[in-house]
Image (cartoon, rainbow, N blue to C red):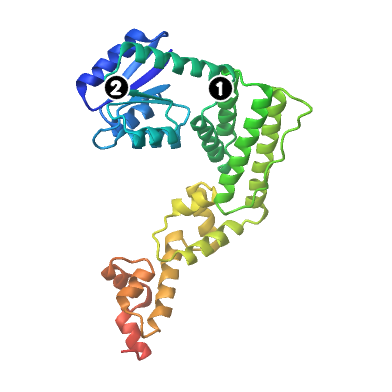
Amino acid sequence: MYRILVVDDEPMIRKGLEKLISQTASAEVIVETAENGADALDRIQANRPDFVFTDIRMPRMDGLELCKHIRENDSSIDVVVVSGYSDFEYAQKCVSYGVKEYILKPVTRHGVAETIGKLIAGMAAKRSIGFIPMAEQEAWIEQLEEAVWHLDDSARSVAEGRIRQYCEEQSISAVQLRDMLYEVMLKLVKNLNKRDVYNFPEPTGPEEAEPGPDSSFRWMRAELDDVMKLIRGKRRGNVKDPVEEVKQYIEQNLSKELTLEDVADRLGLNPSYFSQLFKQMTDETFVQYRIKRRMERAKKLLALPHYKITDISHEVGYADHPHFTKTFKRMTGCTPSEYRDMLGID
């Protein structure tokens, strides 16, 4: 069974090509249609096709942009450009975006049958060697990252099971599986390091002396255990570490509207747990601490005559100047102007 998406803004051509594909395909196919590139992306998201037949000239999003998007997000989808424009420049761009075939209008029954035959043969070859789409791997990595970062053993088991089931269904070879799992772990660690909270070492490659799926999955489990052990150790080793990290982060971002959920996610902690931890360690809520630091920063800036009060308001995260004035008075007992008067600044 193969899924095919036909993309063309002209209804007659769209319906005609849909019918021609259904009649000439040498295997069982499901054909869907889209009116333009934007519509096609929505349909690809809902039901990923194996092949896309697309026109070039379309409103909202043309065929070239659609090809580029598919190339960048799921290059395993084979694309065929169907167009009445035989300009070499178009064909050249299509090739650079990984397009498999280029068919000129008017489309013939023979041309469609030949093209679909090539596509199906190519797809069968991919499946026979255990082809894994990049989009599928990215989904695995995202799922593993969330599970590991939040120390969720149950979610981690689900992610591992998903990977194993997919690889078994695709008949992935032992060597390919070993290399693929190593690549997944490398990208996972890279993503965790991008959070810039803890430093994770790159994984050591799996042993080649013991090939086979069981060996490769045991290796991945051991690597994931090490990553989660490091996170647990960091979070339990010094209970003040998360709070000090947040204090520093708030200080560096006083002009931004940070939420408790934002910083909790940065640390990989449950927001409710982090809220309690912060209050326990500082005797203040997260919001109270942030406002206090903003007002202390405002006082320092108000002591500098060349700063306008409206600029100071923005500098400490208040786009609404009256709100800043009201908050400053509530915290200090006077308005920013009155505070400057007390300092002898006109």
Is 326 left, or right, of 177 in this rendering?
left
- Given residues 103 and 53, the one toward you in this image is 103
Tell me what residue is drawn at x 30 percent, y 89 percent. 346
Quarter-of-image position of residue 214: top right
Looking at the rendered structure, the secondary structure element under dot 1 is: helix
Asked whether the viewer can see residue 346, the reply is yes
Q: Residue furthest bottom?
A: 344
- Point out residue 335 in the picture as x, y percentages from the top left corner: 31, 78
- Given residues 310 and 135, the one toward you in this image is 135
Is 58 left, or right, of 340 in this rendering?
left
In the rendered image of this protein, does residue 301 appear above or below residue 263? below
- Given residues 51 and 163, the one toward you in this image is 51
Residue tagged 2: 33
Alpha carbon separation for disc pair 2 and 1: 28 Å
- Point out residue 151 in the picture as x, y percentages from the top left corner: 59, 41
Instruction: Point out the tag, 2 or 1, that comes first from the N-terminus.
Output: 2
Give the position of the N terminus as an image quadrant.
top left
Residue tagged 1: 166
Tell me what residue is drawn at x 41 percent, y 33 percent. 70
Tell me what residue is drawn at x 31 percent, y 83 percent. 338
Number of marks in the rendered image: 2
User: Within 10 angstroms of label 1, few (less than 14), some, or many (20 or more) residues?
Assistant: some
Viewer-side label of 2, 1? 2
Quarter-of-image position of residue 118: top left
The residue type indicated by label 2 comes to: Thr
The residue type indicated by label 1 comes to: Tyr
